[in-house]
Amino acid sequence: MISLLKARERLLSPLLSSSIRRRLSSNPSYSCEDTRGSDVFIHPSAVVHPNAVIGKGVSVGPYCTVGSSVKLGNGCKLYPSSHIFGNTELGESCVLMTGAVVGDELPGSTVIGGNNIIGHHAVVGVKCQDLKYKYGDECFLCIGSNNEIREFCSIHRSSKASDKTVIGDNNLIMGSCHIAHDCKIGDHNIFANNTLLAGHVIVEDYTHTAGATVVHQFCHIGSFSFIGGGSVVSQDVPKYMMVTGERAELRGLNLEGLRRNGFTMSEMKSLRAAYRKIFMSTETSSLEERLTKMEHNQELNSVPAVGSMLHSIRDSFAEGRRGICKFRQWLDS
């Protein structure tokens, strides 16, 4: 046993900071007390650069790596074989599960707020998969607080210094999801397994995607919308709406999602009336004409939720946008 410990010490010694090498030689136990603070624990086999900033109560498990420019907030926990590289900052009480990789040795930064969970073998804050990215350019990722990013997810930094990949607060990103460069994700979203977002996608708040959803680059997904499983979304999804299909089409309002999020029966009734007049009208007028007519309907447009929906539809036809998903007038809400 003694010979095995000495062999391990010789193998790891060139990689470890001096303080950890001293503790490795004197204390071969599972965890050790780092000199940064009395309540910091770093396993002897972990590689922690002496310049890394380690907060109070941090726990670093076996075979972890913490780079020289890393900042770990108070109470962070790194499970075995998780790694943090580059100019990366973790807020308080973040957890990296086994195999997670956060950050990259690239110009720019990865900044993650407090109380986030990075799942098993997730890869967060690495170089984007965009051929337009020029090596050496700064690239950025900013993640808020209280997010759960599950196993095998991948989240990439921006493709250029003038942009950022941004994720807000309180999102659940299930296993094997992908969020590409320059995406903007709001708050309280749920992405089911294998949801794939291409570059520059904007997702607002309280959206829900079912499994195996694919979203084309530059699409906008409006708040409180729902995307059915296996859908391919190639155009915008306006607020409050539900889409599904191999080329996703409007399937009415996300009434169950609205109910769960506290919308009143009166609001939902008004939204449904407006939806019918725009997308299910028996008139031969164009979508533009029906939308304009609805914008002048004082009774319905006075309801804030209806006004917000109309604004979301109108914005989708602005220059540079992709328009809204196709619809069939016979569909009901």
Image (cartoon, rainbow, N blue to C red):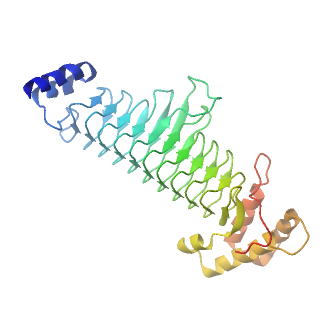
At horizontal 85% and vertical 64% (from top left) the residue drawn is: 287
Identify the image quadrant of the C terminus: bottom right
* Residue 234 percent coordinates (x, y): 71, 51
Nearer to the camera, 307 or 219: 219
From the viewer's perspective, is 314 left or right of 109?
Answer: right
Quadrant of the rendered image containing residue 2 = top left
* Residue 110 percent coordinates (x, y): 47, 37
At horizontal 75% and vertical 55% (from top left) the residue drawn is: 316
Nearer to the camera, 175 or 313: 175
From the viewer's perspective, is 40 left or right of 122?
Answer: left
Nearer to the camera, 243 or 133: 243
How many discs appear?
0
Quadrant of the rendered image containing residue 13 = top left
* Residue 115 percent coordinates (x, y): 38, 51
Q: Is residue 273 above or below residue 77?
A: below
From the viewer's perspective, is 48 left or right of 242?
Answer: left
At horizontal 55% and vertical 45% (from top left) the residue drawn is: 179
At horizontal 55% and vertical 57% (from top left) the residue drawn is: 211
Q: Is residue 148 above or below residue 224?
A: above
* Identity of the residue furthest to the right in this view: 284
Quadrant of the rendered image containing residue 209 = bottom right
* Residue 1 percent coordinates (x, y): 8, 29
* Identity of the residue furthest to the left in this view: 2
Q: Is residue 257 above or below residue 321?
A: below
